[in-house]
Image: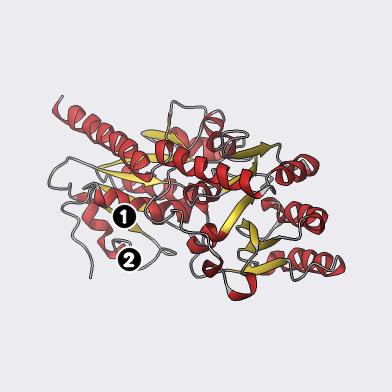
Amino acid sequence: MAQSLDEITVIAPHFKRRLSGVTSTVIQLIPEQRRQGLGILTLGPGLPAHLPKMRWAQLPGLWKSPSAATARVWHARRNNEMLVGLILRDVFRMPLKLLFTSAAQRHHSRYTRWLISKMDAVVATNAKSGSFLKVPHTVIRHGVDLELFHPSEKTDTTNPEDLRGRLLIGCFGRVRHQKGTDLFVRAMIELLPQHPEWTAVISGRISTEHSGFADQLKAVIASAGLTDRIRFLGEVDDIKPWYQRLTLYVAPSRNEGFGLTPLEAMASGTAVVASDAGAYAEMIIEGETGAVVPAGDYEKLRDAIAAFLQPQKAKEAGRKGRDYVVANFGLEREARALCDVYDSLIQQLMVATHE
């Protein structure tokens, strides 16, 4: 059943069917925004059924302002979402203010820069992403749901039977070169023979495009005789228990937009070794909650992992990581900061209307 637009002040389009980092952000963020009293709906495919949505047939309803404001905010996160927002605002003259969140850490194309220049406001997910923007912007870092991601008692009974008694080191995310899965596998092949109490687990989707890459990794693992100690889990239905089972999490990406997995791991009480891709360096206190190494630098990644294969050191870093995320990266902080931006945009239009 479609929800009424009368109390809705924010539309969050999502025009991609496949799971991505943006998808994960939206899935976590919108329920928190609703809990804080924001009237927000999503629009488009690729999101779980429990998220509040509007139907495409309701688009004409955006010509009418909501009951408590003179406009709505269209919060885009991709080029096609910005473009549709522009058409609705400038061609169909709907009362919308356009907001774009940028996570990319690269120079934008001319087309993207043009779209961004037409936005009413821009948010960057971290300082590094903001450095590539040519327009005024606000930095609002992503947060993590501390109720969903939290520590548990890491006893043997929490692990699947064939992994009981093992210390687990994990690497989660799509299995591909960009994510540095090969760097993780290479490090595990080199380090695990010296640390018989540890087992590595890899979880994430293997797309058809990257199946050859994954097959090569599995062949190398088999050649090293480590198939039973470097496990491919595939896509799991619920990743949260796996974060809790880990003692150490590794995020070896060569490039990222923002990257939520280190925050999810730290919120779960797990130490993290990460590259400096995305916003990873802004999440980790070097030597205390984990370590950060240059993206793509295998030797430094291997050595940083090796330093945290001391179980007590990793467990202490995990405890500190949880405290740090609670203090600095709670999802409610991100939701409140975005609400301030939404309110500012709507207020701008209300002032302009009455002048």
Task: Give the residue type at disc 2.
Answer: His
Viewer-nearest residue: 325 or 203: 325
Name the mark on residue 31: 1
Name the mark on residue 50: 2
Neighbour tally class for label 1: few under 14, some 14-19, many 20 plus, Cα within 10 Å: some
The vertical placement of 6 against 327, above or below, is below
Is label 2 in a helix, a strand or a loop? loop
How far across and down, in percent of the image, does residue 350 sit?
A: 18, 32
Residue located farthest toward the right when viewing the structure as drawn: 223
The vertical placement of 242 against 26, above or below, is below
Viewer-nearest residue: 64 or 67: 67
**Residue placed at 33% from the left, 46% from the top?**
74
Is label 1 in a helix, a strand or a loop? helix
The vertical placement of 235 against 145, above or below, is below
Left/right of residue 273 with respect to residue 64 in the rendered view: right
How far across and down, in percent of the image, does residue 39 sit?
A: 23, 50
